[in-house]
Image (spheres, rainbow, N blue to C red):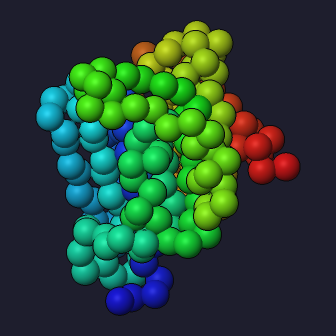
Amino acid sequence: MNNDVRTIVLAGVGGQGTILVSRVLTTALIDAGYDVKMSEIHGMAQRGGSVSTTVRYGKKVESPLVGKGAADILVAFEQMEAVRTTPVLKKDGIIVVNDYKIMPLPVASGAATYPDNYIEELSKAFHVIAFNAGQAAIELGNARVMNIILLGAMVEAFDMGNLDWDSALVKQVPTKFLDINRKAFELGRSMARKENA
């Protein structure tokens, strides 16, 4: 396997904006000259089902797929998705998690329960940056920018600040929502810095 290839996994629930984040991410990486491969997996339903996206980048990426224990960073848009998706992460990998509960279908139907103390448990094996991005988005004035807050946190946590994120946002976000998304991105970066301090 090519050692310069980095792998980012985004995991959430349908309707949370994981796809937009993956598009902004791949745009910034391609514009920076990386070879990028992306794969998306949708759960039972667009809304409410699990959605995960894998983005791999480097000089030359052979496959968009990643095996267990091979991803560098996981961005979890919801608590249960953080727990469910951690098997893909490397030992000492980074998790950026939205410390926020959405009743995914398995929990709502009684087939699964929410884990207790999940942050403490995950922190034993991984570097965890957890904060309530949903609440932060509401306080910013638009609950829908939670995804871009998490993107900003990931950029900070994974030391990707040298890419042209503003250009990627301009290319992927409708103009009328650009200002709030720029604010959300910067808020995510500052929240990750605070959590990392």
Residue 67 at what x, y percent from top left?
31, 73
For residue 195, side relative to residue 26 (left or right):
right
Residue positioned 36% across, 71% down in the render = 68
Residue 185 at what x, y percent from top left?
59, 35
Q: Quadrant of residue 21?
A: top left
Residue positioned 33% across, 34% down in the render = 112
The single residue placed furthest to the right in the displayed view is 197
Residue positioned 42% across, 78% down in the render = 5
Q: Quadrant of residue 37?
A: bottom left
Q: Nearer the viewer, residue 150 or 124?
A: 124
Which quadrant is the N terminus positioned in? bottom left
Residue 29 at what x, y percent from top left?
43, 61
Q: Nearer the viewer, residue 174 or 86?
A: 86
For residue 85, side relative to residue 120 (left or right):
left
Q: Is residue 171 above or below residue 58?
A: above
Query: Can residue 103 be seen at all in this image of the molecule?
Result: yes
Residue positioned 47% across, 65% down in the render = 89
Residue 83 at what x, y percent from top left?
46, 47
* Total marks in image: 0
Query: Can residue 186 be seen at all in this image of the molecule?
Result: no
Q: Nearer the viewer, residue 58 or 124?
A: 124
